[in-house]
Amino acid sequence: MAFPGGMGMPGMNNDTAGMSEQEKQMVKYMQMGMESCAGKTVMSGVMGAGLGGMFGLFMSSMRYDTPYTAQGAEIAALPFKQQLRAGMREMGRASYSSAKNFGKVGAIFSGTECVIEGFRAKSDLYNGVAAGCITGGALAAAAGPQAAAVGCAGFAVFSAAIDAYMRMPEDEKSRPIA
């Protein structure tokens, strides 16, 4: 997108007008890092961990223990300050656990998909399906071969559905299902 007077929007069309050579080199290195499989893997892991942390925090805050359960009665007997401390500790534990899991899934899937795309030299639906299968199988491998097969199939189907939806033209996404 260009504006009158020859000024483009920053970040569009690799426009480096008005930048020093050092800034241009820095932009080039940043783009190379973001396009590499290692960069994508790290970025997906970090973003997945951030999203997982927020999700875990939200889900933990929605969970409550009533005084009718054993754990709830134990917490209700504590002074208010200790109840808050126990609640915050539990929220932190759930947030960390969720962040770790989401980060692991994001990093494995993104890295695998990038490597497959590099080997196949094309970007299509099959890359995501294969990466989903490998990711699901790897995450469930510790539970045995049957769990790994189910994880592979489940993650591959989920990945195919999401990828097919994301590749769908915009006018078909908003069409009502009849």
Image (cartoon, rainbow, N blue to C red):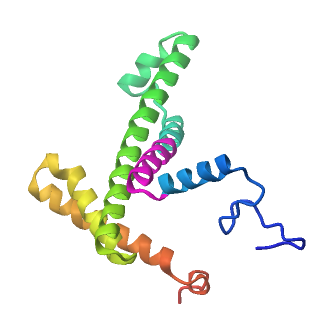
Answer left or right for 147 relative to 40: left
Please indicate, yes or no, whether residue 164 appears anywhere in the rendered image: yes
Q: Find residue 145 and report its image quarter.
A: bottom left
Residue 93 is a magenta residue:
no
Q: Find residue 69 and report its image quarter.
A: top left
Kindly identify the residue that appears in the image at 41 percent across and 17 percent down: 74
7, above or below 83, in the image: below
Answer left or right for 149 relative to 118: left
Spot the residue most to the right: 5
Q: Nearer the viewer, residue 125 or 99?
A: 125
Kindly identify the residue that appears in the image at 39 percent across and 51 percent down: 38
Kindly identify the residue that appears in the image at 44 percent across and 51 percent down: 39
Magenta region, residue range: 35-51
Residue 63 lies, in percent from the top left, at 48, 37
Residue 64 lies, in percent from the top left, at 49, 33
Q: Find residue 153 and report its image quarter.
A: bottom left
Residue 39 is a magenta residue:
yes
Q: Nearer the viewer, residue 75 or 27?
A: 27
31, above or below 96, in the image: below
- Judged by its main secondary structure, the magenta piece is helix
Kindly identify the residue that appears in the image at 53 percent across and 35 percent down: 61
Q: Nearer the viewer, residue 53 or 22?
A: 22
